């Protein structure tokens, strides 16, 4: 194993290795070191020492580095996809899609950095100025810390590593404990590349202790975190004076207008609500339906959901595999039962067997029910009957989250209003709010976070502006 992927302070033994068991089979699928605060600080020091060489490296080298990693990802696609499925239970078809997206993210980061530049400034534009040579450029920020979650254990690492490294920084990565081998295989491609900047990437494994050491240190200049709101709040309170980029929770909603193509809407909403077992920050959770088409849409939504294949993540036909653990499945069933107790009804019989939770469509849901007020992070979607878009709009916006929202409509004026008035970081028209292209800016408002991902926008987070005047 490469020295920059930390395996604890002592030689790896069973005592200082943690086991990762498949959420589907329960078999041990990987092991990871139990790292300490000392390991985290050592990784930060290595990164700090590497910043000089990283900054001095040429853009040509760094772009070649990323493109080499993308090429190796293509060669190892099936192995890495199988590892994702082993560790987090993602259906193999979607695991392959994640590898493909990761390849795109890494490639886009290299291509984007080639065209990132500053600009000249007219310092004599105002009477108080004078004619000079003036411009600004983007400089690498130094050391970045990247902390990533389990639901997209490969591509969400790519959205941090690729922009940070191609911009000339050094990075310490703390991946999710649920997918240590996925992170290891990906990081190894960077570290062993012939174009690698020496010591620019280190990986440490661990939970709160390791994370705390990384975020409270004075060495990193930016913390990039994807995860829960409570952890995001801890980071903000303890990070000190440094850049913090947070991609946190969501409670994505859509509005189904009477003019919409209901068949299309039901098909896309079923995908958006249940892909990755609902374990997506922009999973569709709330569907506000015009009363004139509510019953018809509810019927179509139930029909589309019935078509989804739930089963072994290793089967090509499987759409939905297991939830990440039994605690998540128990929590999901509690959400459903709570809504039923409050007067909602399940259009499909709720079913949970261990970690296997069948997709659930809840009807007759009210805004005061917990199932629509909080992020469920499970394959559950709620239908709410409304009189019109004017009725739905304040309800959609009345959430502490604001990651992505959408509307299904063939009314141009309503489309314009939705774009303008929906309070979210991303708006989608005539598709699920779960739609995301990796080239776009991605991030939310309110408790959904601060900062943006997507190669160009992440590069801006991982760089600082230097202003220059030559008199």
Image (cartoon, rainbow, N blue to C red):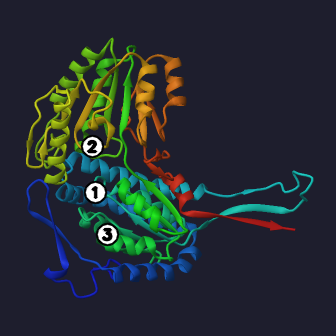
Q: Residue at x 20, y 40 (%)?
A: 335
Please say if 344 is above or below 243.
Answer: above
Instruction: Identify which residue, 320 or 250, lies in the foreground.
Output: 250
Could you tell me if the residues under marks 3 and 2 are in contact, i.e. CB atoms within 8 Å? no
| Whole-number angstrom distance, CA of label 3 to CA of label 1 | 15 Å
Find numbered disc 2 in the image and state the secondary structure of the residue it sits on. Answer: loop
Q: Earlier in the sequence, mark 2 or mark 1?
A: 1
How many angstroms separate mark 3 from mark 2 (CA)? Answer: 23 Å
Residue 16 visible in image: yes
Q: Position of residue 156 (x, y in %)?
A: 37, 56
Judge the density around disc 1: few (<14), some (14-19), many (≥20) Cα neighbours within 10 Å: many
For mark 1, what is the residue? 150
Q: Residues within 10 Å of mark 2 (few under 14, many from 20)?
A: many
Q: Relative to 411, is 210 on the left or the right?
A: left
Could you tell me which quadrant the C terminus lies in? bottom right
- Above or below: residue 334 compared with residue 54: above
Q: Nearer the viewer, mark 3 or mark 1?
A: 3
């Amino acid at each position: 194993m490469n020295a920059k992927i930390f395996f604890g302070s002592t030689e790896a033994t069973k005592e200082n290795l943690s086991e990762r068991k498949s959420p589907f089979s329960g078999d041990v699928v990987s092991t990871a070191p139990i790292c300490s605060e000392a390991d985290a600080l050592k990784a930060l020091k290595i990164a700090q020492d590497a910043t000089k060489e990283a900054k001095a490296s040429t853009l040509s080298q760094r772009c070649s580095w990323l493109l080499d990693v993308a090429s190796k990802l293509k060669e190892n696609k099936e192995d890495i996809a199988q590892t994702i499925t082993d560790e987090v239970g993602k259906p193999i078809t979607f695991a392959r899609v994640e590898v493909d997206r990761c390849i795109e993210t890494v490639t886009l980061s290299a291509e984007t950095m080639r065209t990132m530049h500053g600009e000249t400034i007219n310092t004599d534009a105002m009477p108080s100025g004078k004619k000079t040579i003036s411009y600004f450029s983007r400089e690498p920020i130094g050391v970045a810390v990247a902390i990533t979650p389990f639901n997209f254990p490969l591509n969400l690492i790519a959205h941090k590593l690729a922009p940070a490294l191609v911009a000339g920084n050094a990075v310490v990565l703390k991946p999710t404990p649920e997918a240590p081998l996925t992170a290891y295989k990906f990081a190894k491609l960077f570290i062993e590349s012939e174009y690698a900047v020496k010591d620019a990437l280190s990986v440490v494994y661990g939970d709160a202790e390791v994370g705390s050491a990384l975020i409270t240190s004075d060495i990193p200049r930016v913390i990039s975190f994807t995860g829960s709101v409570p952890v995001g709040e801890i980071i903000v309170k303890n990070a000190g004076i440094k850049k913090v980029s947070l991609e946190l929770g969501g409670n994505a909603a859509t509005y189904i207008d009477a003019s919409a193509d209901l068949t299309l809407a039901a098909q896309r909403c079923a995908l958006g609500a249940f892909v990755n077992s609902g374990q997506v920050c922009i999973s569709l959770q709330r569907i506000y339906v015009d009363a004139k088409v509510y019953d018809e849409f509810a019927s179509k939504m139930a029909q589309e959901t019935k078509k989804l294949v739930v089963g072994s993540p290793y089967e090509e036909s499987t759409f939905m595999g297991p939830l990440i653990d039994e605690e998540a499945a128990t929590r999901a069933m509690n959400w459903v039962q709570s809504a039923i107790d409050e007067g909602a009804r399940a259009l499909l019989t709720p079913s949970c067997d261990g970690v296997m939770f069948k997709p659930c469509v809840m009807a007759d849901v009210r805004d005061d029910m917990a199932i629509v007020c909080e992020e469920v992070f499970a394959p559950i979607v709620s239908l709410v009957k409304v009189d019109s878009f004017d009725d739905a709009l304040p309800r959609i916006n009345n959430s502490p989250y604001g990651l992505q929202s959408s509307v299904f409509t063939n009314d141009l004026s309503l489309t314009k209003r939705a774009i303008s008035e929906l309070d979210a970081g991303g708006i989608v028209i005539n598709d699920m709010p779960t739609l995301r292209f990796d080239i776009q800016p991605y991030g939310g408002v309110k408790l959904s976070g601060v900062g943006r991902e997507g190669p160009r926008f992440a590069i801006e987070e991982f760089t600082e502006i230097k202003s220059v005047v030559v008199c």
